[in-house]
Amino acid sequence: MSKNQTKKKPDPKAAEEKAADQAAEPVEAEIVEEKDVVDPIDALNQEIDSLQAQLTQSKTDLLRAYADTDNTRKRLQREAEQAKKYRFQSAALELLPILDNLNRALAAKPDNPEVQNYVRGFEMIQTQLVNALANEGVQEIDALNQPFDANFMQALATEKKEGVEPGIVTDVMQKGYKLKDRMLRPALVKVSE
């Protein structure tokens, strides 16, 4: 310490004033209320309840995920079965106009004996084509003289015909076909009024 700096002596009066000020300030004592004290058993029971609720939720989520997976598996299996069942649909739709043209050609019966052999050959081809389509589940819709069914028939015209009840198919302009239980092409028909 330098000579100019002198050590201050503690002033007893200042010390008393400081002590009085501190005494005047309220002392913050930790007051522990009874509700802040948590019983460890209650805390453990609350934790057990919380964990049981989480377990129940997890089980529910697992069962829901399992059900969703099972439903997806069943839906995909149904779609695969449908695809397998109707796999021939596009091929049948392409073959039906060929069969129609073959039927039209055979409807004209020639008188020439030389052409008769060709007609027999075309009739065999027609029979084979019809059998091949039938083996794949393609069936002709029987419409002539049947009641009109809008599910399988399309009415192009109506006509008044004696002795025929209204709503009966009187003429088939184009044959209709279905593949198993699904309609491929509606029959184009004329219906009585």
Image (tube, rainbow, N blue to C red):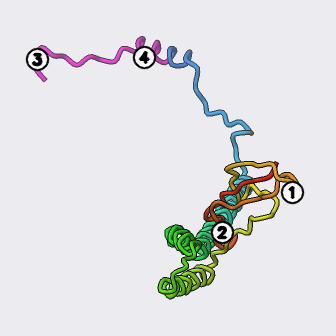
Q: Residue at x 74, y 48 (%)?
A: 158
Q: Is residue 62 visible?
A: no
Rendering coords of residue 165 (x, y %): 88, 55
Per the image, the residue denoted by label 1 is 164
Question: In the image, which disc is placed on residue 14?
Answer: none
Return the residue at label 4: 15
Q: Position of residue 164 (x, y in %)?
A: 86, 57
Give residue 107's quadrant in the image.
bottom right
Find the distance from the CA under tag 4 to the CA under tag 3.
26 Å
C-alpha separation, residue under disc 2 versus residue under disc 4: 113 Å
Q: Are marks 1 and 2 in contact (CB under 8 Å)?
A: no
The residue lying furthest to the front in this view is 112
Q: Which residue is mark 2?
A: 178
Of badges 2 and 4, the one in the foreground is 2
User: Is the residue under label 4 in contact with that under label 2 (CB below 8 Å)?
Assistant: no
Residue 86 percent location from the top left of the image:
59, 72
- Mark 4 is on which residue type? Ala
Labelled pair 2, 3 in contact (Cβ < 8 Å) = no
Q: Residue at x 22, y 19 (%)?
A: 7
Q: Which residues are magenta?
A: 1-19
Q: Nearer the viewer, mark 1 or mark 2?
A: 1
For badge 3, the amino acid type reads: Lys
Label 1 – label 3 distance at C-alpha: 143 Å
